[in-house]
Amino acid sequence: MPEAQHSTQTAALLKLIPTLQRRTHALASTNYQRELLASLPQPRFAERLAAAGLPALRAGQVEVLQLNVGKRCNQTCRHCHVDAGPERREVMGDEVFEACLDLLQRSRIPTVDITGGAPELHPRFRELVVRARALGRKVMDRCNLTITQLPNYADLPEFLAAHQVEVVASLPFYAAQATDAQRGEGVFAQSIAALRRFNEVGYGIEGSGLVLNLVTNPSGAFLPGNQTSLEREWKAQLRRRYGVEFNQLYALTNMPISRFLEFLLASGNLDGYLERLVNAFNPATVDGLMCRYTLSVGWDGRLYDCDFNQMLDLALPQTIAEVEVEHLDQRLIQVDQHCFGCTAGTGSSCGGATT
Ligand code: SF4
Ligand code: SF4
């Protein structure tokens, strides 16, 4: 399907809001986002670590290569930390794509985590999966579910199953109203249809070996509930209401950046939300922070400690083309006020709670 037609069709389907970039909103500037957070009265993240008797954050061995293959997405969720949407044009080019695979080949990083935007929109997404699997790596796809409802992507569940890809799928809530309010009208119904398709090919079904994990995040300026009890509740509700099965639920904290930052500002919740995160600072979350074992690669080949630092342009000095992964061990992680989002309560990472 031609790109313009694809964008128009998905926009009509999901009633999209324009990205910050499209609206030339002040928050489209990453400097402005960081300055805004730093202007609030809360203590600095680095000081809070020190006050808890913790050293500055340093990375360990890279265990996950997280590839952000582009900012294009068929949705424009209100909480998106990427400011992704159908009109975004940032897509990983061939040179960076090959450099990522080259790095994998000459390293022992066991896991490749593919994200975006909607990563499946990348023209070489399937090739990336096939080649990373051929190198013997575990592959994860961060899937927004609705992508599988588009005509050219209907066979994604079969493709992912054939290559034993772990699916991490976002679904804010197990009911339509809260999900659609956050992700766009009609998203919930499409997400349930997608989950049923994943179940049909074996995803989330005991004994199949095909892992389907769900990601939830709060709909407002509050922290997520207890992940274990939420998972129990979600499993019961999704099974009873829709006959849907899944493996684990990851409860993520909304990061005070990008479009969620816009929501916080517009609703007068910014100061209160940051205060809530700071007050919930939990030193026990620090060991499991994803920046300690992840290397995040941007669409243009720049490297970051995590996907959030990527969205705030906090880059490492090296690029994917020149990096030797073992030289990254013990690097100092770049922290700022948004990091309070990862250390609040039971912690938050791409794999859910960290404690
Ligand atoms: S949150 Fe995910 S699905 Fe929603 S707009 Fe951002 S990248 Fe797309
Ligand atoms: S945002 Fe979280 S994962 Fe990223 S550097 Fe800060 S603490 Fe680490």
Image (cartoon, rainbow, N blue to C red):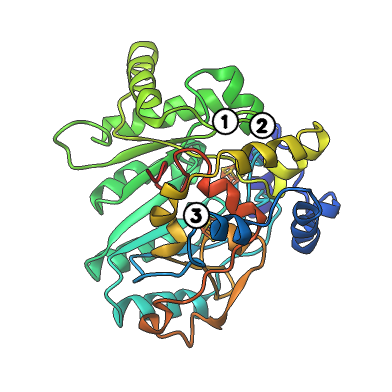
Q: Position of residue 164 (x, y in %)?
A: 24, 51
- Asked if residue 186 shows in the view, the reply is no
Q: Position of residue 142 (x, y in %)?
A: 44, 48
User: At 31% from the left edge and 67% from the top edge, which residue is drawn?
Assistant: 132
Amino acid type of the residue that numbered disc 1 sits on in the rendered structure: Pro
Amino acid type of the residue that numbered disc 2 sits on in the rendered structure: Ala
Of 178 and 317, the residue lying toward us:
317
Pointer 2: what residue?
Answer: 221
Quadrant showing the C terminus: top left
> Tag 2's secondary structure?
loop
Q: Is residue 303 above or below residue 222?
A: below
Crowd tier of the residue under label 1, counting other residues whose Cα lies within 10 Å: few below 14, some 14–19, many 20 or above: some
State the CA–CA distance, disc 2 to disc 3: 27 Å
Pointer 1: what residue?
Answer: 218
Residue 218 relative to residue 313: left or right: left
Q: Position of residue 218 (x, y in %)?
A: 57, 30
> Tag 1's secondary structure?
loop
From the Cβ of disc 2, is ligand 1 less than 8 Å away? no
State the CA–CA distance, disc 2 to disc 1: 7 Å
Nearest to N terminus: mark 3 or mark 1? 3
Q: Is residue 121 above or below residue 148?
A: below
Of 319 and 55, the residue lying toward us:
55
Q: Disc 2 or disc 3, which is closer to the eye?
A: 2
User: At 60% from the left edge and 18% from the top edge, which residue is drawn?
Assistant: 177
Amino acid type of the residue that numbered disc 3 sits on in the rendered structure: Pro
Q: Disc 3 or disc 1, which is closer to the eye?
A: 1
> Tag 3's secondary structure?
helix
State the CA–CA distance, disc 3 to disc 1: 23 Å
Crowd tier of the residue under label 2, counting other residues whose Cα lies within 10 Å: few below 14, some 14–19, many 20 or above: many
User: At 39% from the left edge and 80% from the top edge, which residue is drawn?
Assistant: 325
Q: Specify the label residue 119 is tagged with.
A: 3
